[in-house]
Amino acid sequence: MIIGQIESYDSETKTGFVKDQEEFFKFDVTSWVSSLPPDQGDEVTFELRDGVVVNMRLVAETMKPIEGIKKRWIATTLAFFLGAIGAHRFYLGFYKLGLAQLAFTILTQGYGVLWGVIDAVLLFAGHINKDAKGRPLK
């Protein structure tokens, strides 16, 4: 399997050129197996059989979707009860933001509790929906 990029595609003739690291290869729409039409700049995988491009598809379609590891309900509970010290941010991997919440609570003599409650509402409503590595929350 070769990884490349579509350099050009003409929708009228339904042909184009794909480039791997060094070479250009001509292809036509019959070699395309993805559900979306090809477009210039698309990252693709393809095979060569006797110099002919076959089984060309978008790279994104060959990748497995990212699965969440952290649980939303745990982060929401931590935000509601321990949000003033940034416990939910530490749980989600946002260590600098957790330290900022802790410092804010100390410097404002406890008003950081409001920040934690607001974050709990945002987590519950789904507005905070990813951890620090970009994985969705379960």
Image (tube, rainbow, N blue to C red):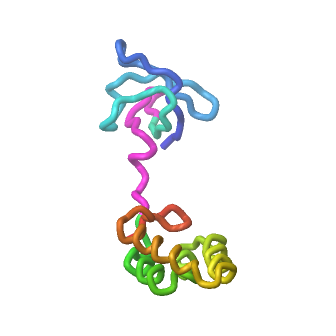
Count the numbered circles shown: 0
Of residues 114 and 22, the one nearer the viewer is: 114
Residue 89, located in which quarter of the rendered image?
bottom right
Residue at 33% in and 35% down: 36
Does 60 appear in magenta?
yes
Of residues 137 and 73, the one nearer the viewer is: 73
- Image quadrant for the C terminus? bottom left
Residue lying at the far top in this picture: please name it: 12
The image shows residue 86, relative to residue 42, as above or below, that is: below
x, y percent for residue 135: 47, 64
Residue 136, located in which quarter of the rendered image?
bottom left
Of residues 116 and 18, the one nearer the viewer is: 116
x, y percent for residue 39: 43, 27
x, y percent for residue 72: 39, 74
x, y percent for residue 73: 37, 78
Residue at 48% in and 26% down: 40
Residue 13, located in which quarter of the rendered image?
top left
Which residues make up the magenta segment? 48-66
Does 32 appear in magenta?
no
Q: Is residue 123 left or right of residue 36?
A: right
Q: Is residue 28 left or right of residue 40?
A: left
Residue at 34% in and 24% down: 29
Residue at 66% in and 71% down: 96
Residue lying at the far bottom in this picture: please name it: 81
